[in-house]
Amino acid sequence: MKTNRSIRAAFVALAAIAMMAVARPAAADVKDYEFQLVQPTVPVGPESVISVRLVNMKTGKPVPDAVIFATRLDMAPDAMAEMISKTTAVPGGEPGVYRFKANVSMEGRWQLSLGAKVQGETGTVEGKLVIQARK
Ligand SMILES: [Cu+2]
């Protein structure tokens, strides 16, 4: 019954990995940060700029110098998750505001998903924002 035992061991190992993935200890501090839209709407166009502000909810202050390492823009809110636009970071703007240029090709709701590292904090700040595109 050696085989059964090693299969069982493999299952136990897999279960442990799965549990770690689900119950990964969230660093308390990243919960204090939030992404907010600067404007709720953007114009439809090939080079629309979306501005988001990263705010420390405890202090109410914007957070400059965060490293935004993941963005995704898609039309999931209008049931078109497969409709994805590439985003490009645009420099400038006031401290704590992060701007992204994208081809917003269609009127409707777009979702911007963000991941960021904040200096001095472990963990990742994640946010999903819904923007209305208008002609
Ligand atoms: Cu669409």
Image (cartoon, helix red, strand yellow):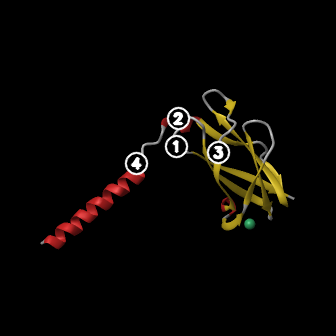
Please state which amino acid type lies under the numbered disc 4.
Ala
Mark 2 — residue?
29
Q: Earlier in the sequence, mark 1 or mark 4?
A: 4
Mark 3 — residue?
67
For the view shown, which residue lies furthest in the top direction? 59
Give the alpha-carbon distance from disc 3 to disc 2, as whole Å: 16 Å
Query: Is residue 44 visible to us here?
Result: no
Please state which amino acid type lies under the numbered disc 1.
Gly
Camera-near label (4 vs 2) is 2
Label 2 neighbour load within 10 Å: few <14, some 14-19, many 20+: some
Q: Are marks 4 and 2 in contact (CB under 8 Å)?
A: no
For the view shown, which residue lies furthest in the right direction? 135
For the view shown, which residue lies furthest in the left direction? 1
Q: In which quadrant of the rendered image does the C terminus lie?
A: bottom right
Q: In which quadrant of the rendered image does the N terminus lie?
A: bottom left
Q: Earlier in the sequence, mark 3 or mark 4?
A: 4
* The CB of the residue at mark 1 lies under 8 Å from ligand 1: no
Could you tell whether 92 is left or right of 130 in the image? right
Mark 3 falls on what kind of element? strand
Which of the two residues, 53 or 122, is positioned nearer the viewer here? Answer: 122
Please state which amino acid type lies under the numbered disc 3.
Val
Q: Position of residue 118 (x, y in %)?
A: 60, 39
Figure quadrant of residue 103: bottom right
Give the alpha-carbon distance from disc 3 to disc 1, as whole Å: 12 Å
Camera-near label (3 vs 1) is 3
Q: Earlier in the sequence, mark 3 or mark 2?
A: 2
Give the alpha-carbon distance from disc 3 to disc 4, as whole Å: 25 Å
Figure quarter occupied by ligand 1: bottom right
Q: Position of residue 96 (x, y in %)?
A: 72, 37
Query: Tag on residue 79?
Result: none
Mark 4 falls on what kind of element? loop
Mark 4 — residue?
23
